[in-house]
Image (cartoon, helix red, strand yellow):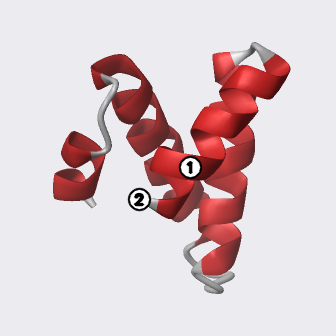
Amino acid sequence: MLFRGFFQQILEKYWKDVTRAVLVTALFFAMIHMNPYWFVQIYILGVILGFLAWKTKSVIPALILH
């Protein structure tokens, strides 16, 4: 909820670029998990979750998928 519901929405409004907001939010999402061996997989999941939250305009589907 912190990443999709708060951080991503603020970046979307500030930058007016959904793609950039999703990619940056996914980067922080991967970094906070602090697992260098799974970084790429977590980053990709973060991108998918970010896109899902943006497309549905709700954090609930991303929360369920997580």
Whether residue 22 is situated above or below residue 33 in the rendered picture: above
Marks 1 and 2 in Cβ contact (< 8 Å): yes
Residue that sits furthest to the right in the current view: 15
* Picture residue at 36% right of the left edge, 18% below the top: 55
Q: Amino acid at mark 2?
A: Met
Whether residue 61 is situated above or below residue 46 in the rendered picture: above
The label number, if any, that marks residue 51 in the structure image: none
Q: Is residue 44 left or right of residue 48?
A: right
Residue 44 visible to the viewer: no
Whether residue 41 is situated above or below residue 12 in the rendered picture: below
- Mark 2: secondary structure: loop
In x, y percent, where is residue 35?
61, 85
Alpha carbon separation for disc pair 1 and 2: 7 Å
Residue to which mark 2 is pinned? 1
The quarter of the picture where residue 31 lies is: bottom right
Residue that sits furthest to the top in the current view: 16
Residue to which mark 1 is pinned? 6
The quarter of the picture where residue 58 lies is: top left
**Label 1 crowd bin: few (<14), some (14–19), many (20+), radius 10 Å:** few
Quadrant showing the N terminus: bottom left
* Picture residue at 42% right of the left edge, 38% below the top: 48
Q: Amino acid at mark 1?
A: Phe
Residue 4 visible to the viewer: yes
**Label 2 crowd bin: few (<14), some (14–19), many (20+), radius 10 Å:** few
- Mark 1: secondary structure: helix
Q: Earlier in the sequence, mark 1 or mark 2?
A: 2
